[in-house]
Structure formats: C-alpha cells, structure tokens
Image: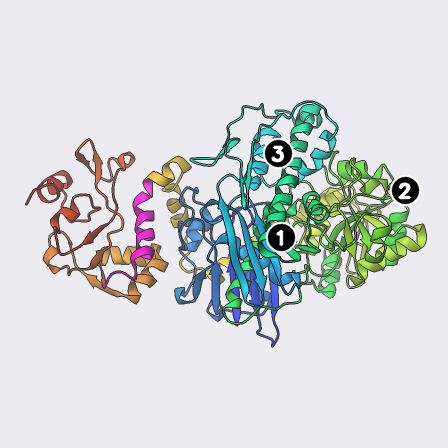
C-alpha cells in the first residue's frame, strides 16, 4: 500500500508525504516544498515534494500510488477548493495532474489531518488531541479529538476568530513582521514583559469550552482585519521599543492563557492523561511549557511540523488508516541522506578544498570560538533544526548571540538561540522533568547555570531546549566531546539558513549558505571545509548559484513531466490571467465554482447528467474530478438543451459550463461584452413540473448569435 498526502490548495506551507508498507513494514517520508524550491512559504504546488517522496521509495510512475489524500477549505474537490483565494500556478497544475480519481479521497476536515499527524507519531496508546491554528476547513480554529486503539474521534470543534488568527494578525498588521514570522513575535514578547501600564490590546476574548472567541478584536469576513485602531510599526528598528514589545508580550500572554484553558478543557472532557498538539499555534514553545506547568496532563507530544507543513503527513496517515492502523516508529529526520561519495566528487569538481573530519574535530573548533555549519543525514521535518541541518557555536560566550545574529543569520538582535543539551544532563541546566527532542518546550533556565551558557538563554531566562539522545549519534558525540573539553554539555544551535531562506536541504544549499555568511567552517558528513582555504569566494558563489539554478529547474521540469499531462506555459498564463486579481476572482468564477460544488453535492441524487459534446469536452479537460464523478453515473448528450427540452428526462441534472446569462435591472447582456455584470444562478434542474420556468434564472448555452433576442424570445417568454 502506497499512500500519498498533499495539501489541496496553494498553501503557505506546501508539502508531500508518503506512508507505505511496500517493504514489509510501515515506512514514511515527508518534505516541505520550500526545502526543494528554495523559496520560503512559497504557495507552490508540491510537485517537487511529491517527486522527492516517490524517488525515496523508488516509485517510478504516478499510477503506482494506491491512494491520494487531500484536505479541503470549503468544498471537497481538487480545483477551486478555496473560493476566495487568488489562483496561482498550483491551481493550473491541479487541472493537469495524472490523477485516477477513483484513488482520491478527502479527509473529513483539515484539523483531522493535523490530529492524525500528532497522535500516531506520539507513541501514546491513548491521548487527547488538541488542534489550534489560524483556520482549517470552513474556518475551523480549535478542535478536540481523542486518539486510541479505535483511531481518532472528534469530540468538539470551534469556528471563527481563534487565537491563531489573532496572533497572526497582530504579527502582521501591528508589529510589521510578515505572516509566517510569528516566532519573531514570541521572541520579542520577552522584551515587553516588564513594561508597565494598561494593556494596549483590547482583546476581550470569550472562553467557553472549545470556543476561544476574539470577535470583538477582529473580523474574519469578508476579510481578516483588526477592529481596534493601532498604528503599524513603520520602522523595524522601532519594534523593540516599549510600545510594540508590550503588544508582543500581551498577545503572547493571551496565547498562553488560551492554550492553558483549552488544555484544561481537553483534560476534563476526555479524561486522558496525555496530550497531543498540532496546528500552527503548537509551534509556540513557550505556551507549550505553560501547558505542562498548569494542567494535569502527565505528558505532551507536539508534532514537530505542527504547522500546515505537517498536514501532508497527517493526510497520508489518515489514508493509510483506511487500510490498517498506521502504527509507526516516528523519526523527525524524514529527509533522504546524501551520498558521501557523491559529495566528495562534487567538492573536487567544484575545486572546494576539504579534509576528512570527526565530531571531535568540530567540537575543538567550536571551543576556539568558531561558528560551524553542521550537515549530516536526512533533514528534519518542520521548522526546527535538530542537529542534522544546524549552525553551531559556543554557548559560553555571551557575545556569540550577537555575532551569530548579525554576521551569520542577518536577523534581529532580540532573536534567541536554542541550547542543544545532552538528554541526561538537561535537568541540571533547565527546570524540566521531561525530554524536549523537537525544541518545542521553553522551560526556565536554572539560575546558577545562566552565567555558564549566556548565549542560549533569552532575556526572560527561558530557553528553547533541544534535548539530544544517543540515538542522534554524530550530534550527541559532538556535544559529548564539547562537554569533555569545557565541562558544559550544551551547544548553541540554530537552523542552517540565512534570514529569509528555507533551511538547507542539499550539500550545495549548505555550501552556498556557508559561503554567503560568517561561518568559518562547514562540516558535511565527515568532510570539513575551512573558509580560509578558499580563494575568490564571490566568484565561487556565482558559479554555484548558477549550477544550483540549473539543478532546480531540471528537478522542477522532471517533476512536472512525471506528474502532469499536457502542461503548457502559455495555457497556464492565460488561465491565471483570467482568474486575477483577487477581487475579480470570486465574481468571474461564481458560475464555475457553483457548478463544481453542485456536482459533488447532488451526484447521488440524480439518475442522469445531461450536457452537450462541447461542454463535456471542457469538463473533461478542466474539471477532471467532476468528469470522473458524472461518468460514474449516466451522461446523456443533448445538443442545444433548451431547444430540445423534450429530450431531457425527468430527474436529470443539466451541466452547462461556461456560458452564462448576465442580468442587471431586468436587462440581458452578452457574456463576453459585459463580464463585470455577473449576477446569476449558474445551474438549473429539470423536473416534471414547470420545466420552462426552470430556465428563467439559468446559465444557458445556445447556438444563437442574437443573445438578447434569444433570451427575450425563449427564456423570458411566458410560453
């Protein structure tokens, strides 16, 4: 059984996952599209990720996939799942996928996929599952499930203005960070904890069970907007002043209260001792620690790819569960490993000097104050660097925080770094009684230890702890050697990327990031590169950038060819042009979307579908999923339906796709000359009674060139 999970709309966090028992045991692979496209939060189709996953399991053809599982926003359909969303290339690609729709299923809701992504990797026999994010299917915001031997069961759900949407809006509209940079708000909050005065944000939430309602503070329809007038931080250097840092603290504090409330509700409602968490809010490691400190839960598992990046994994698990229970041994290192021999060949060909090395050698370099890029094995799934794609430095040096922020990461000075600590030594440095293997808890640092690791302790004395077990062999060995030299079992760890770029995936990604930043050394699977040994670095960067660009283009082309049929750049541009901009999208496509929605809704209620050859070809080309649905029923071809109404049998559903009647002030308009006048009901049903009147408000296709005359004589007549 090979099950593929993919995001079903142009998500900010597209990804793909495969769960399979192809080799006799349950295995999986998962990757975020941004790692392969090198564009952060890209809203791209995950075609690269799909190919990556297929290659991982040597799946040569899309037809070998047994099940494809997707989520949905408003309607369970492949195209136009997000009605109010601007169309991108992803939407065109979905019309071209080589999909056998008999193999396609949709998860019951976006949040259910999140729940699957958290419960089955947790290793818990039973648990409460809390999903909290910006929004999911039909604007769901908070959901509570129970996971046990019977699977995952919904307990309660809330919709509307939840804490995830509020946190995102404050981050974007007030603090001036981009969406997806909520981690900056969490880091900034510590600076505002001691600012006095009344609260600036008038949040006024209502907490009632699963409901956390912030509707007094923000709207969600027709668009997200603040109801409170607060000036946006216009200059990013001002964001650390008292006013904006206090705002960051207030929204962070409210998030902690909110999650404690939801977790306590989950405990009371389910009676379970263990908690799983997913959804984008689950990446708030400070709030996760507050749950452990302020609830009765004995253990917590937060999906390391808690955002929509992890959704594809939950979708694949959901699909696999239709076959058998997906009991897995979870590893966060879901990426593929890169062949060391191939890396050596590449370095030699690129004339990049290197030498054989060990984790002990790297520890020696860090002790001497060097900053080292660390690249081993398969990449981590999710936004945290967990010792496979990391930048490492000495936590004992207080100046190291500013050096890494300014010269390597090129980011804000208030951003904290994580301590990677030997698992067995964690409690000697941090107030915690559990492990934190995914850097999703932020306990307080023991006061006596702060002076020994100042570069990894935030201003509020909290630390985003990453506990490292001996299973992570090379990274554990590095920290162990560092401890033997310094007496400190902790290393400064941050993600291997420059500001604004995704974490590196391939060796060439790592080399480019290394050369562009202030790292002194790069360690790639026992191969050490010293920047001092390299000449003409700027030329080398340009050379490698050109090479990588060609590699990325080649991989994308191969992905499109593998997964799509009849992809045309020209046709794609015309398709997108007709759907843009966003304010026209809904109006111009109302007919199309309603047609798709109704096909899914009424498919089992009608004996036959009636259309003509022209529209059947259009449906086959651009509405493949709906074409599959109607062909499961009986399709009757009737040319010029209105003039041949007697040929249409009762209990038929008439499908006419692209020509519409525009009505304004009782006057008819030509579809092509008045596209802005869209006011219509796009479908009609043919019943035994009052057939002719069914056509009055319908979308009609006909062969007449005299549109107004035709509708005057045939549609609006009383005959």
Q: Does the segment drawn in magenta span residue 592?
A: yes
Residue 341 as seen in the image, left or right of residue 175: right
Q: Position of residue 174 (x, y in %)?
A: 59, 29
Secondary structure of the magenta portion, mostly? Answer: helix
Q: What is the spatial separation of the Cα atoms under label 1 and label 2, in whole angstroms? A: 35 Å
Name the residue tied to disc 3.
177
Asked where in the image residue 621 lies, by quadrant, the reply is bottom left
For the residue pair 168 and 238, the one nearer the viewer reads as 168
Judged by depth in the image, the label closer to the viewer, 3 or 2, is 2
Which tag, 3 or 1, sits closer to the chain's start?
3
**Image x and y of residue 676, in percent:** 29, 34
Secondary structure of residue under mark 1:
helix
Q: Up-down: is 676 above or below 335?
A: above
Q: Earlier in the sequence, mark 3 or mark 2?
A: 3
Image quadrant occupied by the C terminus = top left
Estimate the x, y position of residue 478 in percent, counting from the top left.
84, 56
Mark closer to the chain start, 1 or 2:
1
Give the label, 3 or 1, closer to the camera: 1
Residue that numbered label 2 is attached to: 448
Q: Residue at label 1? A: 267
> Left or right: 191 with respect to 559?
right
Asked if the residue under mark 1 is in contact with the one under mark 3, i.e. CB atoms within 8 Å, the reply is no
Mark 1 is surrounded, within 10 Å at the Cα level, by few (under 14), some (14 to 19) or many (20 or more) other residues, namely many
Q: Which of these two is toward me, 548 or 600? A: 600
Q: What segment is highlighted magenta in the picture?
A: 588-607
Residue 539's spot in the image, x, y percent?
71, 44
Q: Residue at x 79, y 35 (%)?
A: 459
Is residue 280 shown to the viewer in this render?
yes
Q: Residues within 10 Å of mark 3 (few under 14, many from 20)?
A: many
- Identify the disc placed on residue 168: none
Image check: 701 left or right of 89?
Answer: left
Secondary structure at numbered mark 2: helix
């Amino acid at each position: 059984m090979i099950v593929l999970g993919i995001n079903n709309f142009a998500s900010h966090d597209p990804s793909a996952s495969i769960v399979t028992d192809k080799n006799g045991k349950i295995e999986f692979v998962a990757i975020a599209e941004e790692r392969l496209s090198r564009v952060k939060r890209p809203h791209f189709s995950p075609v690269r990720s799909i190919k990556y996953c297929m290659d991982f399991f040597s799946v040569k053809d899309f037809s070998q996939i047994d099940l494809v599982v997707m989520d949905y926003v408003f309607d369970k359909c492949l195209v136009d799942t997000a009605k109010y969303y601007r169309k991108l290339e992803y939407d065109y690609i979905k019309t071209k996928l080589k999909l056998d729709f008999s193999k396609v299923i949709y998860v019951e809701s976006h949040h259910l996929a999140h729940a699957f992504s958290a419960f089955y990797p947790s290793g818990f026999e039973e648990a409460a599952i809390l999903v909290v994010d910006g929004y999911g299917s039909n604007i769901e915001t908070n959901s509570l499930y129970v996971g046990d031997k019977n699977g995952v069961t919904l307990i309660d759900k809330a919709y509307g203005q939840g804490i995830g949407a509020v946190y995102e809006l404050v981050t974007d509209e007030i603090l001036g960070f981009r969406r997806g940079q909520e981690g900056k708000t969490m880091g900034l909050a510590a600076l505002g904890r001691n600012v006095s005065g009344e609260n600036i944000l008038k949040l006024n939430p209502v907490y009632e069970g699963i409901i956390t309602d912030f509707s007094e503070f923000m709207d969600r329809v027709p668009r997200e907007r603040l109801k409170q007038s607060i000036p946006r931080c216009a200059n990013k250097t001002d964001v650390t002043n008292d006013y904006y840092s206090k705002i960051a603290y207030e929204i962070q504090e409210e998030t902690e209260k909110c999650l404690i409330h939801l977790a306590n509700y989950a405990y009371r409602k389910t009676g379970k001792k263990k908690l799983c968490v997913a959804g984008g809010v689950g990446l708030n490691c400070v709030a996760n620690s507050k749950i452990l400190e302020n609830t009765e839960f004995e253990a917590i598992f937060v999906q390391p790819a808690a955002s929509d990046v992890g959704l594809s994994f939950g979708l694949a698990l959901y699909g696999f569960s239709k076959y058998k229970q997906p009991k897995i041994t979870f590893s966060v290192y879901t990426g593929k490993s890169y062949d060391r021999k191939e890396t050596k060949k590449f370095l030699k060909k690129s004339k990049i000097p290197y030498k054989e090395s060990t984790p002990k050698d790297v520890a020696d370099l860090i002790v001497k104050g060097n900053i080292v890029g660390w690249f081993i094995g398969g990449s981590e799934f999710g936004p945290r660097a967990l010792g496979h794609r990391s930048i490492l430095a000495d936590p004992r040096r207080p100046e190291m925080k500013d050096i890494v922020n300014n010269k390597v990461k090129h980011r804000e000075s208030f951003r904290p770094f994580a301590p990677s600590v030997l698992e067995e030594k964690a409690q000697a440095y941090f107030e915690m009684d559990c492990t934190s293997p995914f850097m999703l808890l932020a306990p307080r640092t023991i006061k006596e230890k702060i002076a020994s690791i100042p570069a990894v302790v935030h201003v509020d004395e909290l630390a985003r702890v990453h506990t490292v077990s001996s299973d992570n062999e090379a990274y554990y060995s590095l920290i162990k050697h560092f401890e033997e030299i310094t007496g400190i079992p902790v290393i400064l760890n941050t993600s291997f990327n420059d500001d604004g770029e995704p974490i590196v995936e391939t060796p060439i990604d790592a080399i480019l990031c290394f050369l562009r930043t202030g790292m002194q050394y790069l360690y790639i699977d026992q191969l050490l590169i010293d920047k001092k040994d390299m000449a003409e670095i700027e030329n080398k960067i340009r050379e490698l950038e050109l090479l990588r660009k060609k590699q990325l283009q080649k991989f994308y082309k191969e992905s499109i060819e593998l997964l799509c049929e009849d992809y045309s750049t020209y046709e794609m541009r015309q398709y997108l042009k007709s759907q843009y901009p966003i304010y026209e999208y809904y109006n111009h496509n109302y007919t199309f979307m309603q047609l798709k929605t109704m096909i899914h809704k009424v498919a089992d209620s009608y004996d036959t579908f009636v259309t003509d050859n022209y529209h059947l070809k259009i449906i086959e080309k651009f509405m493949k999923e709906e074409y599959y649905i109607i062909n499961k029923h009986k399709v009757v071809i009737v040319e010029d339906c209105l003039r041949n109404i007697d040929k249409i049998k009762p209990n038929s559903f008439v499908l006419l796709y692209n020509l519409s009647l525009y009505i304004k002030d009782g006057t008819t308009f030509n579809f092509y000359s008045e596209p802005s006048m869209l006011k219509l009901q796009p479908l009609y049903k043919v019943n035994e009674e009052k057939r002719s009147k069914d056509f009055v408000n319908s979308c009609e296709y006909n062969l007449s060139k005299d549109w107004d005359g035709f509708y005057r004589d045939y549609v609006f007549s009383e005959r």
